[in-house]
Image: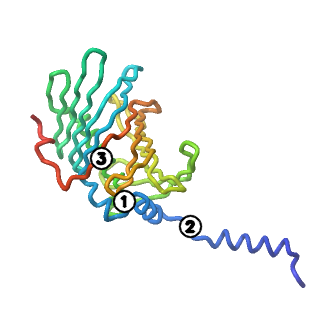
Amino acid sequence: MRKPLAIVLTLIFINMVCGQPADTPQAVVERALKAHGGADKLAKTRAIVQTAKGQITSFGAAVPATSEVALQLPEQGRWAFELDAGEQKVLVLLAVNGDKGWRSGGGALKEMAKPELEEQRERAYTLWLTTLLPLKEAGTELALLPETKIGDELAVGLKVNRKGRPEVRLYFDKKTNLLVKVERKGKDAGQETTLECYLSDNKDYDGVKVAARQIEMVGGKKIADWTLTSCKFPARLDEGIFAKP
């Protein structure tokens, strides 16, 4: 006996849907690597120097600022911020060098207290993960997260874990496969909170796609909004820039 056409079409549709292979974390990573320039280009992102302009929100007020970030990932990072506070400019420096860290601001130079040092080290570690190649290394555990909307677009999420490190969540635009959000737990003023960075306006820097717009959030509130003015990938940075003056 011949089956009605509607039943046949339904069976074909079910077979097509059920026959599709499930997405995997590894497939998400491979698509992201390709979208960002490929493994060969991304291999040079262990050392990065970026400059940016934008604003930092402090006590509810947005203050114009510029920044210069030097990274030798995952263990070294130096962040320099110049805030335009009306009639004067305020320079703030932060640096981590392995298990040591220091900060400078307002004419004072001091070693980082342990909680701040740990937080800045996790910041450098998270930035290392965003260079994507660490996601393929042994010891990195990946798990898919449910699709979510970021802005108006769907994004695919990955939960990233490594022994002794905090969990980091990376979200990639479903259409472009570009990294659009980074999320982790961290501390702000001694309190645990959610730290997020939204990434957009990707530009090509020496063959690598880098988000030229970066918005940082703490506990759901915007604390910084940056637009890159330059991005370079030196072969290696001078170790002296991370050392305490």
Q: What residue is disc 1 on?
A: 135
Circle 2 or circle 3, nearest the eye: 3
Of tags 3 and 1, which is closer to the observer? 3
Residue on which the image places disc 3:
231
Q: Residues within 10 Å of mark 2 (few under 14, many from 20)?
A: few
- Check the image and name the residue furthest to the top: 87
Mark sitting earlier along the chain (3/1)? 1
Q: How far across and down, in percent of the image, does residue 182 sit?
A: 42, 46
Q: Amino acid at mark 1?
A: Leu
Residue at the disc numbered 2: 22
Q: Position of residue 222 (x, y in %)?
A: 44, 31
Q: Nearer the viewer, residue 80 or 5?
A: 80
Residue 238 visible to the viewer: yes
Image quarter (top left, top right, bottom left or bottom right) of the N terminus? bottom right
Disc 3 crowd rating (10 Å Cα; few below 14, some 14-19, many 20+) is: many
For the residue labelled by badge 1, is the local secondary structure a helix, a strand or a loop?
A: helix
Looking at the image, which residue is at 55% across and 53% down? 146
What residue is rendered at 35% in x and 31% in y?
188
Residue occupying the point 48% across, 53% down = 172
Give how far apart the Cα atoms at labels 1 and 2 are: 19 Å
Instruction: Check residue 73 in the rendering and tell me which mark sits there, or answer none.
Output: none
- In this picture, residue 243 sits left or right of residue 38: left
Left/right of residue 57 with respect to residue 106 in the rendered view: right
